[in-house]
Image (cartoon, coloured by chain):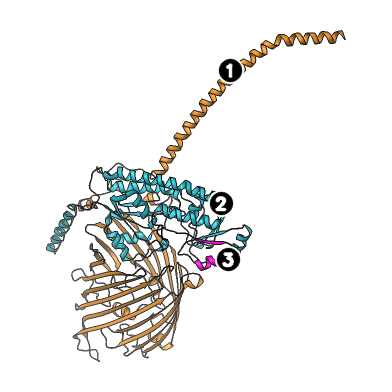
Chain colours: A cyan, B orange
Amino acid sequence: MRRILLFMLAAAAVWGSLDVSVVRAADKLRVVASITDLKALTEAVGGALVEVDSLARSTQNAHDLEARPSLMIKVRRADALVLNGLDLDDWADVVAQGANNPNVIVGAPGRIDASRGILVLEVPRTRIDRSMGDVHPSGNPHYTLDPGMAAPVTQNILEGLARLAPQHRAAFERNRQQFLARLDEAMSRWNKLLEPYKGAPVIVNHNMWVYFLTRFGLTQAGSIEERPGIPPGPSHLVKLVNQMKENRVKVIVAEPWGDLKLVQRVAQEAGAQPAVLASSVGAFKGTDTYIDWVDSNVKMLAQALK
Amino acid sequence: MRALLTLTLVLGLVAVGAAPARAQDAEALRREMEQMRKQFEAMQEQYKKTMENMTDRIQRLETQPQPTAAPPTPATPGRENGLVQAAPGSPPYTGPSPLDLVKPREPFALYERRGAGQLLFDMGVTGDFIGNLTQSNVEKNQGGSFSGLENLFFPREVELSFFGQIDPYARAEVRVETGKDSRGGDLTVNLAEAHLTLMTLPFGTQLRMGRVRNRFGLLNELHSHDRPFIDDPNVLVQFFGREGLRESGFEATWVPDLPFYVQLLGGVFNGENEVAFGRNTLRHPLATGRLRTFFDLGDFGAIQLGSSIAAGQTPEQKQSNIIGFDMKYKYTPTGWQRALFTAYGEYLISLRRALVSDSDGNNNEERRRDRQGFYVGADVRPFAHGELSKWLLGFRYDWTQYPVNPGQEWAVGPFIAYYPSEFLRFRLGYKHTERTNCCSYFNFADNGGSARRVDELFLQATFILGAHPTHPF
């Protein structure tokens, strides 16, 4: 018995000393982002100094992703994990745990919460429970859809990357400033394009567009999903169609993974136009960068509002 | 008239005399106004500058990460709040060393993830209720899938779970459960699971210790309410008993750095399971092992393959080994939030030595018993959206030998499930079982009657209240 204990102690000591002697040879930081929007923003900040992959595919609903072992493999070797937070990507915790990678578990320096310090919309002010559907107790988590949020989000990413590679902080800052300058330029273009429709009421399918609509002065007048994550009942749909007719709502904004047949049907009943926008970077062809993605959404929305 | 003329004259004189004085006043007024204008412009300029400064400050603050809980005095240089802070020029963080692990440390700022008034861990309640109907002879012989609880509606498992991060290095999970075990018996409260997992061990290893549902095969680690079928597969019940393999001990996992997913697991446990092992001592422990791998098959398909082993001793000090192979396949096309099609299967081999008596119950002899069994099942969710997406159809086929006694049984059972939401589920199922011999480990035929052909109707209601840990694939 004593010999077994001694052997175990010796093995633990060797294991630990091997770990201390680990030297990282990779030049680039290996970063995994939970969603493609954050992948794009991390690439914008990290540039050639990072290698970024994302867990969710651009066409997937990121609310409830399955923690597949193939995702764990992506995280297994990661130096950093960029998370959306606000309860959108809680599944990433299971992925991080299954990856056996201490760099990215809760509390590790490689864990980057992109939502820190942002102005969160729709934070519940009253008692919430699941009779309200799949509500997010920390507020609406879809802030990456708002290009105005790119500044604080990229700042969080920058801080996270600089924590792991402080020698590259200046380069990350330079990349970020260049990206924000390009974004500012595009923003004035987008504002101009949607300026004529300020205040226009819009219906959404899933309640994920509020940041995007608010940024450009449009009003979210209702949603097809009566309660998040629960298919709507017929009485809600009848009420919604009447409300749309009354308020002359022209557009229903929907995400590619939503129930598009239902969106089409409601739009037809109410005499409105469905606008299926890219819910994540890369969801449609030509939306592979953050700016291209927002650009595509703004143009499609403006076209639908005409 | 004279008076009028005098008044006019006086007023005229006053007016003529006052003209230079008014001009002087106007000049003074203009100067004063000019001075005021300058003062106002200076104030305006100052105000503008102040506003600009404040706006800049707000923008800076907004773009900076929010401060977390007040940082305590760093315990050691380079550490703050228990977290390693990278210093300029330092190499990337590679996890805490064994020396770090043994040092006493302060809890780190878990508060940053939580708002005021929230708990530092998650908790949830799940309830799983079963109703079943079967033949009276099956009830008499306790030969149903829920042995001893035939023709009854009962709480199978009501569970209170707590889980979360202990500190930067470990997380814990505690589950307390109650449920009905026998027709007349009271509800008993059990510690279903209580374990901690060390997350930051080197080289992709983790260590779990405590009371666990062993990661043996596909279903054993899942609690009853999380399983894809209403009742448990016959082979698992015959080889491990109704409780499954639930042990106290240690379990280590390793995920090697490979291009595809492989998880290796090794464990040492007491051997408490009375059906398969039961020696219940670390001097002759139950050793477990598992190899699990996974492959994506295109964008929509995925398959997991696994192999498990559990080797221990029975109370009679006889060797008992169980080897298992498992497979799970899922197909989730675009638009389907849950899998459109899922297939499961496990094949188990039991290799054990047992004391076998003759028909009179005498002359116990040691005999080798090599037995096997399997189940396959599948479910399909035909619709992606709308009301119909809440429905799921499934079935399972079972075949197994009894681990010690002679004989075998097979069963087939279709079921239908309705999910009003992610947190509520109803299932209705039918199961037909046929047995060649009477004696499974339950000895259900000892009190007369056959129960060789069993038809059962099941109703299950399951709810989740509060948090529930996400299960891997």
Q: Amino acid at mark 1?
A: Arg
What quarter of the picture does the C terminus of chain B occupy?
Answer: bottom left
| Disc on the earlier residue, 2 or 3 | 2
Which of the 4 image quadrants contains residue B268? bottom left
Between residue B324 and residue A43, name the one nearer to us: A43
Horizontal arrangement in the rendering, residue B90 relative to residue A217 (left or right): left
Chain assignment, label 3 = A
Residue A197, numbered circle: 2
Along the line of sight, the residue nearer the viewer: B422 or B250 = B422
CA separation, marks 1 and 3?
71 Å
Place of residue A101 in the rendered image (x, y in percent of width and height, measured from the top left)? 27, 58
Question: What residue did someone put label 3 on?
Answer: A268
Is any atom of residue B79 visible in this view? Answer: no
Q: Residue at x 42, y 43 (%)?
A: B62
Image location (x, y in percent) of residue A191: 50, 48
**Percent from the top left, x then y, of residue A48?**
29, 50
Q: Residue at x 26, y 63 (%)?
A: B209
Start and end of the magenta stretch?
A: A256-285
Bin the neighbour count of mark 1 within 10 Å (Cα to Cα): few under 14, some 14-19, many 20 and up.
few
* Chain assignment, label 1: B
